[in-house]
Image: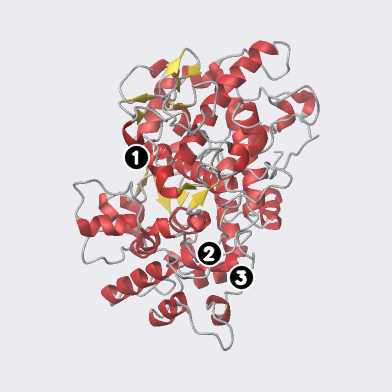
Amino acid sequence: MLTNLRHGDHVAGDDVSSVDPTSRAEDSIEWARVKRTSTPFRYMFDDLQDIYPEAHLPIEPAAAVVASLKALGTAMVEQPGDAATADSTIPPILTYWGQFVDHDLTANTDRNDDVSITDLPLEPLQPEKVERDLRNLREPRLNLDSVYGNGPQFSGQPDQVPYDGDRLRIGRTTAAHPPGNVAIKADDAHDLYRVAQKAQIGDGRNDENLVIAQLHLSFLKFHNAVLDWFAANPDHKVTGDGSFARARQLVEWHYQWITVHDFLERIADSTVVDDVLNSDEHLFKVDKDTPTDEVFMPLEFSIAAYRFGHSMVRGAYDWNENFGFPGDRSPSSSFALLFRFTGNGGFFGNPTLPDNWPAQFERLTGSAATPPGAVEPTPPRFARKIDTHLAPPLADLSNEGSTETADRIKRILRRLAVRNLLRGYRLAIPTGQAVARSLGIPPLTRAQLLSAQDGQAPSPVDDALVDGAFLESTPLWFYVLREAEVIGDGERLGPVGSRIVAETIIGQLRADPTSFLNQGWNPTLGVSTGPGSDDVVDSIITFLRFAGMHP
């Protein structure tokens, strides 16, 4: 098995047909069943569950632990007057590529009634109950079921992704830009397809903010562009029969490759990623012969480590020329507006996305240079650092909680840091120190966990850690963020976070017999943006460019 192919690597004869993608089309009825069949959540560190609760936060007194977690979550959100958190050098697109991957892998961790965090009194569950009652409503594969749904043969049926033949249907923007604004795209087919504002997509969470909605749109456009590329390159070695199934397979492989070799290698410690790719010993052990509905998603990933992206979210973005640099109209788009300009947010009464709001992704990928002599754009074109400080908008997520939701429940659901910490406690996630020791990694010291240096006054986060007795037993989500802050300088995950995230994503690819890892595929065998050897689609930027979403 070839596990680490890069540019210039080839399989014998450049043969990429060892998986027959047409079998997927023939198996479409089974796909529909699989999509409706839940898959398990389990613990990656089952050795720590065997000694529950020694490796976890205290069970009693639960009310005191819950109060301390709420205090810590509240302290993590920046308040007016706080010193501004420095930006990272990470392009913002990685924040939302990561969110897209999360939605492709998992669903149901935050809204399952059997493990609710809104029940009072909130107490931790026994691990065996969590594994029995919490089910993943996604196939834990990077197979884009969030994009394709059940395939074109089900198009037109209720709650199915809409197609035009083999092509994914695209929606149109509304010509509604006010004086002083410009239409961002000459082509008005630049929104998700909608019915009564609701996006007709495989996962409604991908319409919760405009960044993820426009990224989802790029996957629809990428698929359609692959079909166009087949027609323009009839003799190319990878075209197969030019069918929907072959197009989907190539989209998946490009997406999987980019997720490992662009997203993961930039967001995690690259030496850890390389070790996971090349080692025969794996922390996340799932055999590729395991049936799809038995492949589990690690709870330590879904509930804790992979939520690192929440700290990267900005309060505002340099979004497009109307709501960003050069700032003669509005210097940025607030995060609140990016929630409002979705179907879930109501578009301020428009039926679809107004034509002054499509993304100019070059502002989010780190590829757009500031014009000579111009003032630097506000806000900068970077994500926030991966650390223990969250942007203020994450203290009140406007699209969370329905109008019928009780105020108490709504307050919990809208406070992202509090919700993450309570979820980890409720679902018996082990502490950061316990996980580090299980991995053979020295745990963070008290001095590393506290942000105040010698002679400095403790921060509100420091006070919450001390008051909650969290310095020896630290919630895993917080621990992963703090580790990234002190070891990764906020630019990448530390050793514990990197290991959990890399083991899970690469492990899911290993468990999928159709993945690029198991098929020995690399981007030189895929579609390209031009005729040259440098035109392979092997990064987020080239992916967006092939989709027509990036210059």
Q: Residue 402 at what x, y percent from top left?
A: 24, 46
Nearer the observer: mark 2 or 1; the answer is: 1
Residue at 37 percent across and 50 percent down: it is 109
Of the residues shown, which amino acid type is indicated by label 3? Val
Disc nearer the start of the sequence (3/2): 2
- In the structure shown, which secondary structural element does the residue marked by tag 2 occupy? helix
Which of the 4 image quarters holds residue 242?
A: top right
- In the structure shown, which secondary structural element does the residue marked by tag 3 occupy? helix
Residue 153 appears in view: yes
Residues at marks 3 and 1, CA–CA distance in whole angstroms: 37 Å
- In the structure shown, which secondary structural element does the residue marked by tag 1 occupy? loop
Q: Residue 132 at what x, y percent from top left?
A: 32, 52
Residues at marks 2 and 1, CA–CA distance in whole angstroms: 29 Å
Residue under pointer 3: 486
Residue 481's tag is: 2
Label 2 crowd (10 A; few <14 / some 14-19 / many >=20): many
Which of the 4 image quarters holds residue 293?
A: top left
Disc nearer the start of the sequence (2/1): 1
Residue at 54 percent across and 77 percent down: it is 451
Q: Residue 300 at what x, y percent from top left?
A: 47, 58
Residue 345's tag is: 1
Which of the 4 image quarters holds residue 238?
A: top right
Residue at 66 percent across and 52 percent down: it is 273
Of the residues shown, which amino acid type is indicated by label 1? Gly
